[in-house]
Amino acid sequence: MAYDSSNIFAKILRGEIPAHKVYEDDSTIAILDVMPQAEGHALIIPKAAAESLFDLDPRLAAAVMTVGQRVALAARQVFRPEGLTLMQFNGAEAGQTVFHFHLHVIPRYAGQALRSHGRGFADPAVLAEQAERLRAALRPDGRLPSLQ
Protein backbone atom coordinates (compact mmCIF):
# COMPACT_ATOMS: atom_id res chain seq x y z
CA MET A 1 0.00 0.00 0.00
CA ALA A 2 1.34 3.46 -0.89
CA TYR A 3 1.52 6.15 1.79
CA ASP A 4 -1.69 8.21 1.88
CA SER A 5 -0.80 11.84 2.62
CA SER A 6 -4.44 12.61 3.46
CA ASN A 7 -4.26 10.68 6.76
CA ILE A 8 -5.03 12.60 9.95
CA PHE A 9 -1.42 12.64 11.20
CA ALA A 10 -0.10 13.99 7.90
CA LYS A 11 -2.71 16.76 8.16
CA ILE A 12 -1.64 17.52 11.74
CA LEU A 13 2.02 17.62 10.68
CA ARG A 14 1.15 20.09 7.90
CA GLY A 15 -0.77 22.28 10.37
CA GLU A 16 -4.12 21.67 8.66
CA ILE A 17 -5.71 20.18 11.78
CA PRO A 18 -5.06 21.34 15.36
CA ALA A 19 -3.63 18.99 17.95
CA HIS A 20 -2.76 19.06 21.65
CA LYS A 21 1.00 19.13 21.15
CA VAL A 22 3.26 18.27 24.08
CA TYR A 23 6.61 18.15 22.26
CA GLU A 24 8.15 18.75 18.84
CA ASP A 25 11.62 18.53 17.34
CA ASP A 26 13.04 18.24 13.82
CA SER A 27 11.99 14.61 13.38
CA THR A 28 9.04 13.96 15.71
CA ILE A 29 5.93 15.41 17.30
CA ALA A 30 4.18 14.21 20.46
CA ILE A 31 0.46 14.92 20.84
CA LEU A 32 -2.38 13.75 23.04
CA ASP A 33 -4.76 11.21 21.54
CA VAL A 34 -8.18 12.83 21.04
CA MET A 35 -9.79 9.44 21.69
CA PRO A 36 -7.68 8.42 24.68
CA GLN A 37 -7.72 4.99 26.22
CA ALA A 38 -6.55 6.49 29.55
CA GLU A 39 -5.70 9.88 31.04
CA GLY A 40 -2.55 11.25 29.41
CA HIS A 41 -2.60 8.92 26.37
CA ALA A 42 0.04 10.38 24.04
CA LEU A 43 1.11 9.60 20.48
CA ILE A 44 4.67 9.95 19.21
CA ILE A 45 4.66 10.57 15.45
CA PRO A 46 7.63 10.83 13.11
CA LYS A 47 7.47 13.73 10.66
CA ALA A 48 8.57 11.51 7.76
CA ALA A 49 5.95 9.84 5.57
CA ALA A 50 6.02 6.25 6.83
CA GLU A 51 2.94 4.06 6.85
CA SER A 52 4.33 1.45 9.25
CA LEU A 53 7.44 0.19 10.98
CA PHE A 54 8.40 -1.54 7.74
CA ASP A 55 8.67 1.86 5.99
CA LEU A 56 10.38 3.78 8.79
CA ASP A 57 14.06 4.72 8.64
CA PRO A 58 15.83 3.06 11.62
CA ARG A 59 17.17 6.45 12.79
CA LEU A 60 13.60 7.76 12.97
CA ALA A 61 12.49 4.63 14.81
CA ALA A 62 15.20 5.39 17.38
CA ALA A 63 14.09 9.04 17.59
CA VAL A 64 10.45 7.99 18.14
CA MET A 65 11.46 5.59 20.91
CA THR A 66 13.68 8.20 22.59
CA VAL A 67 10.87 10.76 22.60
CA GLY A 68 8.43 8.04 23.70
CA GLN A 69 10.63 7.17 26.66
CA ARG A 70 10.91 10.78 27.73
CA VAL A 71 7.19 11.47 27.30
CA ALA A 72 6.63 8.33 29.41
CA LEU A 73 8.89 9.78 32.12
CA ALA A 74 6.89 13.02 32.05
CA ALA A 75 3.58 11.10 32.12
CA ARG A 76 4.80 9.10 35.11
CA GLN A 77 5.60 12.35 36.93
CA VAL A 78 2.35 14.11 35.97
CA PHE A 79 -0.27 11.34 36.12
CA ARG A 80 1.33 8.99 38.68
CA PRO A 81 0.29 5.75 36.95
CA GLU A 82 1.15 2.34 38.41
CA GLY A 83 2.36 1.24 34.98
CA LEU A 84 2.65 2.36 31.40
CA THR A 85 1.84 0.65 28.10
CA LEU A 86 3.64 1.32 24.81
CA MET A 87 1.72 0.11 21.75
CA GLN A 88 2.50 0.21 18.07
CA PHE A 89 0.44 -1.42 15.29
CA ASN A 90 1.47 -2.33 11.73
CA GLY A 91 -1.34 -3.07 9.28
CA ALA A 92 -5.11 -3.22 9.61
CA GLU A 93 -4.98 -6.82 10.78
CA ALA A 94 -2.78 -5.74 13.69
CA GLY A 95 -5.19 -2.96 14.68
CA GLN A 96 -3.61 0.00 12.88
CA THR A 97 -6.31 2.57 12.04
CA VAL A 98 -4.18 5.56 11.01
CA PHE A 99 -1.68 4.55 8.36
CA HIS A 100 1.17 6.78 9.48
CA PHE A 101 3.61 5.13 11.91
CA HIS A 102 3.02 6.17 15.52
CA LEU A 103 3.74 4.99 19.05
CA HIS A 104 1.09 5.04 21.79
CA VAL A 105 2.24 5.98 25.32
CA ILE A 106 -0.58 5.07 27.71
CA PRO A 107 -0.49 5.52 31.51
CA ARG A 108 -2.06 2.53 33.31
CA TYR A 109 -3.75 2.22 36.69
CA ALA A 110 -4.53 -0.78 38.88
CA GLY A 111 -8.04 -2.09 38.32
CA GLN A 112 -8.65 0.18 35.32
CA ALA A 113 -9.03 -1.46 31.92
CA LEU A 114 -8.08 0.44 28.80
CA ARG A 115 -11.02 2.29 27.32
CA SER A 116 -11.97 1.24 23.82
CA HIS A 117 -10.21 3.32 21.21
CA GLY A 118 -12.32 5.22 18.70
CA ARG A 119 -15.44 5.20 20.87
CA GLY A 120 -15.63 8.93 21.46
CA PHE A 121 -13.67 12.12 21.74
CA ALA A 122 -12.27 13.48 24.99
CA ASP A 123 -13.27 16.92 26.23
CA PRO A 124 -10.90 19.39 24.48
CA ALA A 125 -10.54 21.42 27.70
CA VAL A 126 -9.39 18.31 29.58
CA LEU A 127 -6.90 17.48 26.82
CA ALA A 128 -5.59 21.06 26.85
CA GLU A 129 -5.03 20.88 30.62
CA GLN A 130 -3.28 17.50 30.36
CA ALA A 131 -1.10 18.76 27.51
CA GLU A 132 -0.08 21.80 29.55
CA ARG A 133 0.90 19.60 32.49
CA LEU A 134 2.96 17.31 30.24
CA ARG A 135 4.67 20.25 28.54
CA ALA A 136 5.63 21.64 31.95
CA ALA A 137 7.05 18.26 33.01
CA LEU A 138 9.04 18.09 29.78
CA ARG A 139 10.98 21.09 31.17
CA PRO A 140 10.27 24.80 31.16
CA ASP A 141 12.79 25.35 28.36
CA GLY A 142 10.92 22.86 26.16
CA ARG A 143 13.63 20.23 26.42
CA LEU A 144 12.84 16.64 27.22
CA PRO A 145 13.57 15.29 30.71
CA SER A 146 16.89 13.59 31.14
CA LEU A 147 17.08 9.83 30.96
CA GLN A 148 19.54 9.92 33.90
Image: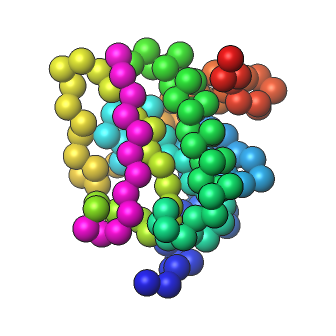
Q: Is any part of residue 83 visible from this angle?
A: yes
Q: Is any part of residue 29 visible from this angle?
A: no
104 lies left or right of 118? right
**Which of the two residues, 19 or 42, is positioned nearer the viewer here?**
42
| Percent coordinates x, y for residue 62 in the rendering | 63, 48
The residue located at (41%, 51%) in the rendering is 88
26 lies left or right of 148? right
The residue located at (39%, 28%) in the rendering is 84
| Residue 126 sits in quarter | top left
The image's colouring method is: rainbow
The residue located at (28%, 60%) in the rendering is 95
**With respect to residue 84, does 61 lie above or below?**
below
**With respect to residue 95, does 131 lie above or below?**
above
The residue located at (24%, 52%) in the rendering is 119
68 lies left or right of 15? left
Is 90 a magenta residue?
Answer: yes
Is 135 a magenta residue?
Answer: no
**With respect to residue 68, does 95 lie above or below?**
below
| Percent coordinates x, y for residue 53 in the rendering | 49, 62
Quick one: quadrant of the N terminus?
Answer: bottom left
Magenta residue span: 82-93
Quick one: quadrant of the C terminus?
Answer: top right
